[in-house]
Each structure stands twice: as structure tokens, then as C-alpha cells.
Amino acid sequence: MHKLNDPKEAVQTRRRWRISVFFFGLLVMLGVGLLVNRMTSPVLGHKNVRLFFASFGYSSLQPADREINRELWRQDPLRAVVRALMDGPMNNDSLPVIPPSAKLNGCWLAGDIAWIDLSSELFLGLAEEADAELLAVYGLVHTVAANIPEVKKVQILIDGAPRATLRGLTRISQALHPRKDLEN
């Protein structure tokens, strides 16, 4: 049986209470520290990227700057930038180069080549203008090369396989370099 006025018991109770408060304070400080670290992390916020869309009349590529989620960029920069291009322009200054029906099957880096596998809706949904095919291919090439410095060339696959041309005019059988002559 414990005595309420036992000085030894009172000292031990105060000691346990102080230790509990100390560890609770440490946990609170740790939680606040993690929260502050997470909020000031460079992963949060947005990453500015440059995308290339078609000009009206499909005469050239037009650059457009966009912010994308930094967390998506950190996870897979290639996928993030290709998806941003596939989302199309955010204003009425240019035309999309990738039809909305196209799907990204996969993408990866191998050395200085970015491999991008798109669904066949890429060429099935292109505008009828002859240069729409050329600008779709090079809009993708320019966007990837402009945002991922280690990429020098882009290889496009359709449903996992290489093709000689996208829709009959623009060769995609080999990895392609950007063509500055197509930029506005």
C-alpha cells in the first residue's frame, strides 16, 4: 500500500512526470522539424518547363513555358514533361501537337536517348495538315531535349514497336535530334 505523503514516492512521481514531459516535448519538436523540412523542401512547389506546340496553320513550333508539379518532376522528369506536352496548350496561342486521344505507354532513358512509347492514337488523331505529323514528332523531341539536359536524341515507338514513319511522311525509325529550323 502506498502512502500519499511518502516523500520518496512523490519524488519518483515527479521524476516520471518530468521524463514524460521531456519526451513529449522531443516528439513535438521532431514533428515540427519534419513539417518545416517538408514545407521548405525543394520537392514542393512547381518546376518550370518549356513545351513546344504547333503554331496556327502548323507552320512552326512555338515554345510555351509551364509550371508542373515538382514532386512529379522528382519522381520521373521524362514522364512529367511528356505528360505536360500531352495536356496541350493552356492558352489560345498555339495548337496541341499530340492528339488528346493518344496515350503514353511508357518512357525511359538509355544513355543520351529518351525512348517514348505512345499509342497508335498518336497518328490516328493528328490534324490533316501535312506538317501536323512533322510538328508532332519534333514537338515531342524539342520538349524532351529542352527540359532534360542529358537527352541528345529521342526515339519514338508506337505501341511498343519502332515504325519507319509516323503517318507516312516523318521518319521515326531512328532516334531524332531537335531541329532548330522548326522553331518560331
Image (tube, rainbow, N blue to C red):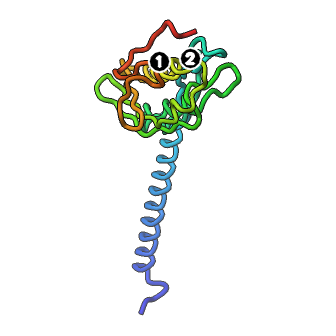
How far apart marks 2 and 1 lie (CA) works out to 8 Å
Residue hosting label 1: 169
Residue hosting label 2: 130
Q: Can residue 146 be seen in this view?
A: no
At horizontal 48% and vertical 84% (from top left) the residue drawn is: 5
Question: Up-down: is 82 above or below 60?
Answer: below
Labels 2 and 1 touching (C-beta < 8 A): yes
Residue 46 disc label: none
Q: Is residue 161 visible?
A: yes
At horizontal 61% and vertical 16% (from top left) the residue drawn is: 58
The N terminus sits in image quarter: bottom left
Please tell me which residue lies in front, 61 or 168.
168
Q: Is mark 1 on a helix, strand or loop?
A: loop
Please name the amino acid that badge 1 sits on: Leu
Crowding near pointer 2: few (<14 within 10 Å), some, many (20+)? some
Please tell me which residue lies in front, 46 or 130.
130
- Residue 84 position in % (x across, y down): 54, 31
